[in-house]
Image (tube, rainbow, N blue to C red):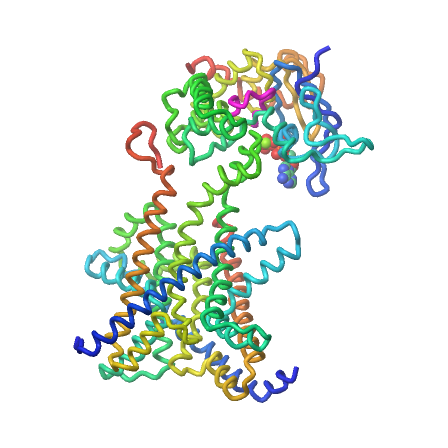
Amino acid sequence: MSELSNLLPALPELARGFAITIALSLCAMVVSWVVGAIVLVVRLSPVAPLRILATIFISFMRGTPALVQLFLIFFTLPMIGIKVPPFVAASITLGLNSSAYVAEILRGGLGSLHPGQAEAAEALGMRSWRIWTRVLLPQAVRVSLPSITNELTLLVKTTPLASVVAVTELSFAGQIIIARTFQPTAVLLSIAAAFLVLNLILTSLAGLLERRFDIAGDRR
Amino acid sequence: MTIPALRTEALRKSFNGVEVLHGIDLSIMPGETVCIVGASGSGKSTFLRCLNWLSPASSGHVYLNGELIGVRETAGGSVVPLAHKQLQEQRQRIGMVFQSFNLWPHRTALENVMEGPRIVLNQPGAQARATAERLLERVGLAERRDFYPAQLSGGQQQRVAIARALAMKPEVILFDEPTSALDPELVGEVLAVMKELASEDTTMVVVTHEIGFAVEVADRLILMDGGQIIEDAPPRQFIEAPREERSRRFLDQVLSRGLAPVHTIHTSE
Amino acid sequence: MNFSHDLMTYAVPVLTKGALSTLKLGLLISVASLVFGVILSFGLAAPNRVLRRLSRGLIAAMRGIPPLILILIAFYVLPDLGVMLSPIAAGCGALIVYFSAYVAVAVRGALDAVPAGQIEAALSIGMTSRARMLRVIVPLAWPILLPALCGLLIGLFKETALLSIISVPELTFETKQAVARTYAPFEIYAMAALLYWAWSALLETLSRKLEAIANRHKNPGTRRRQGASS
Ligand SMILES: Nc1ncnc2c1ncn2[C@@H]1O[C@H](COP(=O)(O)OP(=O)(O)OP(=O)(O)O)[C@@H](O)[C@H]1O
Ligand SMILES: [Mg+2]
């Protein structure tokens, strides 16, 4: 229990890390949803080269580790003269990574709305922007809400990767404290608990939302 | 006196404390075809599923040719559940045909029928195959033996399911609304097979809404209501002179819809 | 791209070594996760309530805690409790527990998705529980399980990159070393990414082939012309 009392002075540091974790999750989430929706539209576009590009993007993002993507973006952007703060680089990378999954989830959602996924894709590609934003995307989001929630918790679980580019989110704050106090047990278990609670809150909020939309009722 | 092929004694069944079968006594003699009719929720399926212990009775007994089903009596006189192995052996002797066919989708028609003889009765492959081919021929599906269930119509699937039940050479066959999931034009082909089985003195218990079939084929017609047997009589007598008021009401409802199924039997095949 | 001599002679062998190590670790973790995941899936449906609760709790924890944190816990906390593990053992152990939970959920879901009527049909002809499992439940659950499982395995190979953080010499770790030596981050990270990508694509193709085989009975060939329907 002496460990816990040693941990007390570090609490503000951990709290700050937790706040950064939440901020990072939110930023990455916004990126993933915006980019995900765009990638989906491009993926279903009638222009073949665009479609292929989107397919390659999705395949690459889903086929390589987020950690390697982060290194790739963080260390090579400065070489072509783009300076980005670590937090921004992490938000973008984690967001882009997740966007590929969001696009595929939404595509599945659209497919379940229309009979014959392939034909639907052809037909959908020619729809106007307004139909996309007013009709198709909201419906796709509605039916795929459970998968989107799941993807969101997975996104939250990738945020500790930002520690490798020195974003002082929760896990990096923890590692700093551990280096100073040599007491990993209490720190790491608290961090694990914090993530667990965050994700539990997320899933129960999503559960409420699903019940609001009566998604379960539609599905069975 | 012959022993009944199937007999129930004060059979009761509750789900979560709610009793849905209120003590049913029924004897079915070898070779008899008994049709059970009744409103939705009256307990017909539950009763049928107690007969082969798919759903164990809460109290009371089921006897198959004199042998207790699902339970055994100990020396001390108390009743305990039977070991899995013995229950499985008893179920081999009771065939069942389901409303939704329940053919195994990953096996062809022939494989579905062979499965019991091959896997349960451990017959050599060639023998099981010969049995299955003969049975498929008997239900008129010899040329469809290599088709998967997804490639067969509902009526064909149900006929395969009947062949699958027959392959175990059961002492009794239970049918739970075998034609309710079928398009009207496919009902006749299944009823025709069942009619033939009845004429060959197969012991059958058939839950059905096809009152025309029941009248034509059944030796006895039973009306269930509220978890009890209301009327149990030969079909002609049931229709012309039912003893119970509830039977009369049931008949009024059903007969107002006509006896169409009888015609389908005659026009098919 | 400017592939200097140094880059080619140094980086390629190092990355190859790392890739082989990632392959080995990934296979080990895959096999172990499959085994423990199946065991855990039975825990989820155990007759014993305590066992059921424990399984459910473990799975909820694994779904909520980032794998990196689990690796750090295995690496830093276990020694505190007197369990000394090498970085490889700690890291692999953490990932095995993590993925076992996901495998268990997938297996349970697939088993539960087998329609009750299919099992009743097996019961009604008197099949033993073993025959029911092998002849009916597993063949019907398999096509449902396969895509989920393949997705998990592809994810698993990618997550092995996390092991680099506790200095397990796998592909990402070797890549970082090579970058430190050659100062050519783009070329080397891109090479590493391509290696991961190629492996994922291979697994993806394999998984499609397997799915097609598992779903054969749903689209039987054109050989039988009559009555074909999807
Ligand atoms: N597994 C179960 N759990 C709880 N209640 C059940 C269960 N199975 C049946 N019941 C209840 O038992 C009663 C009888 O149902 P049963 O299915 O036997 O009726 P049925 O006569 O076959 O009706 P139908 O013509 O609709 O098939 C119903 O009130 C039903 O709700
Ligand atoms: Mg019923």
Q: In which quarter of the image is ligand 2?
A: top right
Residue C18 locus on image (x, y percent): 33, 69
Residue B241 locus on image (x, y percent): 67, 13
Which image quadrant: the N terminus of chain A?
bottom right
Check the image and report above or below for A117 versus A203: above
Q: Which quadrant of the figure has residue C1?
A: bottom left
Q: Nearer the viewer, residue B240 or C131?
A: C131
Check the image and report above or below for A45 versus B240: below
Residue A191 seen by the camera: yes
Residue B97 locus on image (x, y percent): 54, 27
**Left or right relative to A104: residue B104:** right
Check the image and report above or below for B125 versus C181: above
**Left or right relative to A14: residue C50:** right
Stretch of the chain drawn in magenta: B165-176
Q: Which residue is drawn at 53% across and 83% down?
A: A14
Residue B41 seen by the camera: no
Q: Residue at x 46, y 66 (%)?
A: C92
Check the image and report above or below for C218 versus B197: below
Q: How many labels does the image show?
A: 0
A159 within the magenta span: no
Q: Which residue is drawn at 42% across and 79% down?
A: A163
Q: Which quadrant of the figure has residue C13?
A: bottom left
Q: Which quadrant of the figure has residue A57?
A: bottom left
Q: Residue furthest right?
A: B76
**Left or right relative to C145: residue C43:** right
Q: Residue at x 20, y 79 (%)?
A: C6
Q: Which of C4 and A200 is in front in this view?
A: C4
Residue C27 locus on image (x, y percent): 40, 59
